Every structure is written in C-alpha cells, then in structure tokens.
Image: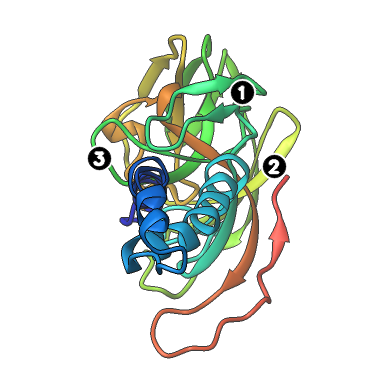
Amino acid sequence: MDIDLPFILFWAVLACGVVWLVDVLFFRRKRLAKNTEAAEPALVEYARAFFPVLLIVLVLRSFLAEPYQIPSESMVPTLEVGDFILVNKYAYGLRLPVFGTKVWDIGSPRRGDVMVFVPPHDSRYFIKRVVGIPGDRVRYDNKVLYVNGQRLKYELIGEVTGRGYPPSMREYRESVDGRSHLIYKTARFEPTQEWEIPPDRYLMLGDNRDMSQDSRYWGLASEENIVGKAVAVWLHKEPGWHLPSFDRNRWFD
C-alpha cells in the first residue's frame, strides 16, 4: 500500500489535460492555418489519447472502488497476507482525490466495519477494524473490549497453531452491535487502556490483537483521512512464485 496511485493519476490527468488544452487554445489553429494536413506533435497526440482513459480510471478509483493488497498479518484471521480486497470509496461519502475533502456525505463508519485509512503517524494506507465511534467510551481490559460500559461477547473457537505463534494463541468470535468476526489473541499481559472518542475520530484495532500496531500505539484515526470501507476479498496470492487463487473470495458483513 505504499504507492499513492490516486495522486499519480490526478497529476497525470492534469498534465494531459493542460497539454491538450494549451494546444487547442494557442497552437492548433495556427498549425492548421499553415498546413491543413499538419500532424499533431507527439506530445499533444499522446496527451489527447491518454486524457479520457486516465480520467475514467481516476474517477472510478477515486469515487467508486479501488483494489488493495494486504501486506501484513495484523488483520489475520479476517485478512491474510496476499489477499486482494475491494474498497468501497463512497460508503462514507465522496471525497476529492488527492485532497481528501468530503464533497458529499453519504454515511459514517459503524462499529465492526473494516476500514482503510491514513493513520496520524504514517502517510501509508492502513486497514483495521472500527471499534469505537464518536461519542463512545471504550475500555480495553485484560484483552476484552467494553464499549459504553457493555462487555463485548466472546466465543472461544480453539487454539491457533503454526506460523510460529505462541502456544497461548487462541481464536475467538467477537461480537459487536449484532455483528461478529474472528480475532486472535494470547494471554500475554497488556496494560488496560481507555478512550473517550471525540467527534470525527475512530478507534481502530487489528483482528490479530497481539500482532497489530493500531490505535493502542498511535492514537485515533481521523475522519478526514478515511479512504473507504473494505467490502470483499476478490483474489488471493501467496507471496513468491505462486499462482493467484479465488478460494478466499467473499463479501464482508
């Protein structure tokens, strides 16, 4: 998630549009007046050809949907390394590409959503689960979440083996607001933390609780830095020389 493709697309569209427009306004008429069969300069020809294509791609990726690949284990077991996810860019409102300014408010993140955003400490895109929304009081005590005084429901699924995980790693089904998802956590000690979520801020946690750098370490996510809502896994490819597969394809709740 290190390449900011919308940024690149925005400036590519702008550059092609400017080159094409300058030629139409200042040079094309003079060129044709001298020779009606005069060919366009190569730069203008390429700009005119690429502009509509790049513009369509920019609009689709900026306002509708965009694919991302999962680079880490912070959202295991929900998302595996190598999962390609589809992000709904308009679920939480339409935003201007590059600048991120919201121009149309459609909805707000809900507890339990899997969200892509830019954290306060890094310029890269992160993906975590929304645990606390504005107005919430959240406490994380002995690896258990309490939202507004209510303990979330946990169902033990079983022990997790392999991958070098510690023997105490276990899988649970965590439920919030009637929606459930799987998480991993160990018995390793972790100090109690508590948050009062202010307006336009969100508490974000990874589903792999002991292997996730999230709001427990760098603070709350800002509404202005939301990218979109993860809605599906559409492809999976193991790192290295492996063929992609569709075995993990599914929609999120």
What residue sits 23% from the left and 35% below the top?
Answer: 121
Which marked residue is nearer to the observer: mark 2 or mark 1?
1
The residue depicted at 25 percent of the width and 40 percent of the height is 122
The local crowd at label 3, few if under 14, some if 14 to 19, many if 20 or more residues have their Cα within 10 Å, is few
Question: Can you see residue 187?
Answer: no
Measure how far apart labels 3 and 2 are at the Cα level.
Answer: 29 Å
Q: CA distance from mark 1 to mark 3?
A: 23 Å
Q: Residues within 10 Å of mark 1 (few under 14, many from 20)?
A: few
Which residue is under mark 1? 108
Please give left or right for residue 161 compared with residue 19 in the image. Answer: right
Task: State the CA–CA distance, disc 2 to disc 1.
Answer: 19 Å
Q: Amino acid at mark 1?
A: Ser
Residue furthest to the left: 121
Q: In terms of image quadrants, where is residue 168?
A: bottom left
Residue at (45%, 37%) from the top-left corner?
A: 97
- Amino acid at circle 2: Ser
Does residue 124 lie above or below 190 as drawn?
Answer: below
In which quadrant will I find the N terminus? bottom left
In this rendered view, identify the residue nearer to me: 37 or 126: 37
| Residue 202, percent from left and from top | 46, 24
Q: Is residue 193 above or below residue 239?
A: above
Of residues 23 and 90, the one nearer the viewer is: 23
What residue does disc 3 label? 122
First in sequence: mark 2 vs mark 1: 1
The correct choice, above or below, for 9 with respect to 159 in the image is above
Residue 209 location (% of width, % of height) = 43, 46
Secondary structure found at label 1: loop
Q: Which mark is residue 222?
A: none
